[in-house]
Image (cartoon, rainbow, N blue to C red):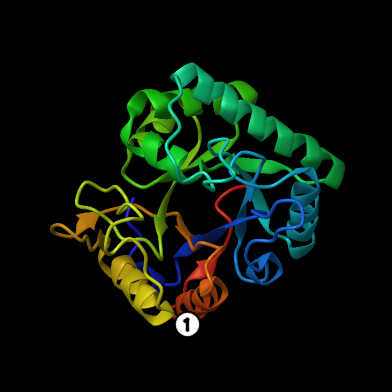
Amino acid sequence: MRFCLRYVRAGRMQIDLNADLGEGFGAWSMGDDAAMLRIVTSANVACGGHASDPTTMWRTLEAARDAGVTVGAHPGFNDPIGFGRRLIPMSSAEIAALVAAQIGALQGIAAQVGVTVAYVKPHGALGNLAARDRPVADAIAQAVQAIDPAMAILAISGTQSEKAARDAGQPVFSEIFADRGYLASGQLVPRDQPGAMIHDAAEASARLLAFLDTGLMPTTDGDPIPLAAQSICVHGDGPTAVAMATDIRARLTAAGVTLRAFAGS
């Protein structure tokens, strides 16, 4: 599915704007969640793997509820020191258990707060591994399906994660990244390589609007590639996150795009 601005001009386009939130731990905070929750329509809430703890989850879910923002689980490798951005060797069965445990933890607190965990989006190194490794993608999809066949998976567009969820019959939505570089393979540029991140809000917004006009995403190592997009991710932990998300929301709205959560609405 390709969203293009020619449909926007007819007033027919809507898209989700998501961010990774609740990524503090104990006395340490990460990003400006309160500001981001006034901008995004979906919040990927860390659930005790790469970040967060019960109190942080509780506060983030309460804030999302009060802001009317849809919430999803954001499970990652159990690696708070590396913020879930390091690849931890695990079997597919171990990854399924890891994901299930973190989803369950967030669901337990969500039940106390009175919100529903509507979807799952793997974090960092786990998400990138699932994007290219079909057995890992299958393990995640099967774990989610065992918990709730109606729970959606938010997958990096065009990757094994998307295909595995679809083949499993799980609801799946495709996301693109406003502030990440792409390879011609459809994978994200690794963070230790040039072009991995876009830090300038105007540059990110311009690339995003061009993508929505053509359905083609520029890459750092080849020709632009076609991607689908039901959701746009802006990372919530960088120093320019709020400015970038604000700029993107304003430009999308000015282009006639309706911002609406893809799940739970």
44 lies left or right of 256: right
Q: Residue at x 39, y 81 (%)?
A: 202
Q: Is residue 242 above or below residue 231?
A: below
Q: Residues within 10 Å of mark 1 (few under 14, many from 20)?
A: few
Which of the 4 quarters of the picture holds residue 101? top right
Q: Residue at x 34, y 50 (%)?
A: 1
Q: Position of residue 87 (x, y in %)?
A: 42, 37
Q: Is residue 252 above or below residue 142?
A: below
Q: How many marks?
A: 1
Can residue 243 be seen in the rendering of this structure?
yes
Residue placed most toward the observer, 172 or 44: 44
- In this view, the residue farthest toward the front is 81
Q: Is residue 177 above or below residue 89?
A: below
Q: Position of residue 28 (x, y in %)?
A: 71, 58
The amino acid at mark 1 is Ala
Residue placed most toward the observer, 172 or 30: 30
184 lies left or right of 87: left
65 lies left or right of 100: right
Q: Position of residue 188 (x, y in %)?
A: 32, 51
Considering the numbered disc 1 on the image, is that residue within a helix, a strand or a loop? helix
135 lies left or right of 36: left
Task: Name the residue carrying label 1.
Answer: 254
- In this view, the residue farthest toward the left is 222
Q: Position of residue 105 (x, y in %)?
A: 72, 34
Q: Residue at x 45, y 54 (%)?
A: 230
